[in-house]
Amino acid sequence: MGGELRYEIAQNAYIKLVLHALKHKTSAVNGILVGRVSPKNDVVEITDSVPLFHSQLGLLPQLEISLILIEEHFAPKGLSIVGYFHANERFDDHELGSLAKNVGDHIYRYLPQAAVLLLDNKKLGALSKTKDRSPVVQLYTKDASRIWKLVGSDGNQLTIKEPSANVVLLDHISTEKWQDVVDFDDHLDDISKDWLNPELFK
């Protein structure tokens, strides 16, 4: 499934997830991808992202509550959950772990085109030197055997909607914009903190 599908992520959705990972460099973090499947051109449009957790990633009650809140918020806008984001705790860990696969499996049950994005720390670390325009994440989709597979790294299947997104990302990194990212963990500690991050890019 998804071999012919393309995935396009909006700049702010992409940057928000990477900044979330940078805010919690010594922890694994995760997030939800929100968007729609465009039937006309076989594109999964990832229009927004929601940072989830940085402490207890695998706690089911919090995960279920967050997924319900996300669905309720975005459904009136014609958007739904289209995937999952994960950044591993260790810089040199490039494997898609069991937690990421399990959350991905849950989303896949409702959307066979679901994507799992895994942060590529090596690419992120080299970004300031290489001026690469491709996303600093790896794309995983389910194949016909229903196993999560890394999709070719030729950069064609996952693109950022705005070509200069990595330049903007580097600018946000230099100004430590990551300090402003709020995730569900922060919201559960202090409900005045908005997990939608409405002020992040203003």
Image (cartoon, rainbow, N blue to C red):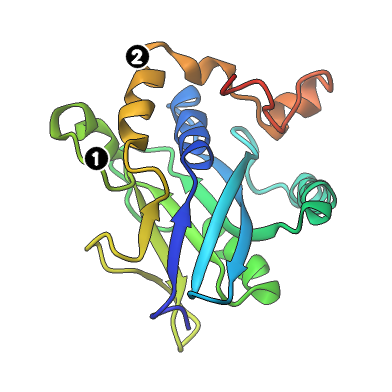
Q: Badge 2: few (under 14), some or many (20 or more) residues near its Cα, within 10 Å?
A: few
Q: Residue at x 60, y 45 (%)?
A: 48
Instruction: Determine the secondary structure under disc 1.
Output: helix
For the view shown, which residue lies furthest in the top direction? 175
Residue 195 is situated, as x and y percent measured from the top left of the image, at 72, 31
Q: Mark 1 sits on what residue?
A: 122
Q: Confirm or deny contact between disc 1 and disc 2 (CB under 8 A).
A: no
Q: If you read the primary sequence from the N terminus, does the residue marked by circle 1 or circle 2 appear first?
A: 1
Q: Nearer the viewer, mark 1 or mark 2?
A: 2
Residue 67 is situated, as x and y percent measured from the top left of the image, at 76, 52
Q: Mark 2 sits on what residue?
A: 174
Instruction: Determine the secondary structure under disc 2.
Output: helix
Q: CA distance from mark 1 to mark 2?
A: 18 Å
The reply, left or right, for residue 17 in relation to residue 170 is right
For the view shown, which residue lies furthest in the left direction? 129
The answer to whether residue 116 of the structure is visible from this angle is yes
